Image: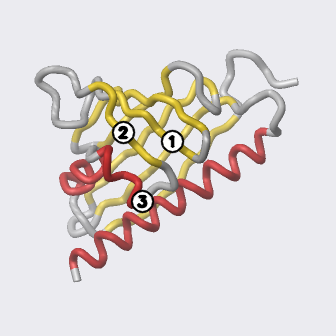
């Protein structure tokens, strides 16, 4: 049986991308177009809080993966990265994503962390594998996008 109140799934992935943190932030906050990189559809259901950058803090997006739909809220967004969480029911519980940007002068190291609890009826290692596979795919797509944009 899974423990209650603790997050059983922790994922940390890294990808170097030939772009600036500012360009990454702009692309990752363009929620309706995130499907270019992620195996999901995104639609904004609530705009960012007043005074925040477009798509930033307070923005709520609906995520569609296959027949699954759930809501994610942007907790913070800046040149140092983006933090978001699933709100309401979702495929996993207590989900939080942290995407950190580390400027390396000519490129940006992206550190993508996800913490969550998987459903009780699916082993955590399977949920972790699926999430990690999809995030790796998205990070490679982002890297390729900026490589072609630079070239």
Q: Residue furthest left?
A: 51
What x and y, as percent, mark residue 150? 21, 77
Q: Quadrant of the N terminus?
A: top right
Q: Residues within 10 Å of mark 2 (few under 14, many from 20)?
A: some
Q: Residues at badges 2 and 3 in contact (C-beta under 8 Å)?
A: no
Q: Nearer the viewer, residue 81 or 38?
A: 38
In terms of secondary structure, where does tag 2 sit? strand
Q: Label 3, on which residue?
A: 37
Q: How is the image coloured?
A: secondary structure
Rounded to the nearest angstrom, the CA distance separating label 2 from label 3 is: 14 Å
* Residue for point 18% across, 37% down: 54
Q: Residues at badges 2 and 1 in contact (C-beta under 8 Å)?
A: yes
Q: Quadrant of residue 46?
A: top left
What x and y, as percent, mark residue 84? 41, 32
Q: Residues within 10 Å of mark 1 (few under 14, many from 20)?
A: some
Q: Quadrant of the C terminus?
A: bottom left
Rounded to the nearest angstrom, the CA distance separating label 2 from label 1 is: 9 Å
Q: Which mark, residue 64?
A: 1
Q: From the image, state whether disc 3 or disc 1 is nearer to you.
A: 1
Looking at marks 2 and 1 on the same chain, the residue that comes earlier in the sequence is marked by 2
Rounded to the nearest angstrom, the CA distance separating label 3 from label 1 is: 14 Å
* Residue for point 44% across, 51% down: 111
Q: Label 2, on which residue?
A: 43
Q: Residues at badges 3 and 1 in contact (C-beta under 8 Å)?
A: no
């Amino acid at each position: 049986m899974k423990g209650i109140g603790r997050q059983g799934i922790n994922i940390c992935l890294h990808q170097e991308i030939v772009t600036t943190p500012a360009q990454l932030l702009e692309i990752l906050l363009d929620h309706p177009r995130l499907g270019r990189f992620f195996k999901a559809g995104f639609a904004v259901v609530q705009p960012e809080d007043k005074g925040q950058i477009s798509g930033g803090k307070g923005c709520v997006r609906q995520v569609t993966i296959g027949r699954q739909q759930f809501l994610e809220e942007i907790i913070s967004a800046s040149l140092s990265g983006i933090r978001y969480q699933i709100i309401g029911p979702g495929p996993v519980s207590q989900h939080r994503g942290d995407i950190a940007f580390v400027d390396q002068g000519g490129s940006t190291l992206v550190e993508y962390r996800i913490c969550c609890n998987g459903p009780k009826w699916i082993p955590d290692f399977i949920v972790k594998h699926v999430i990690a596979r999809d995030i790796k795919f998205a990070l490679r797509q982002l890297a390729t996008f900026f490589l072609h944009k630079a070239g």
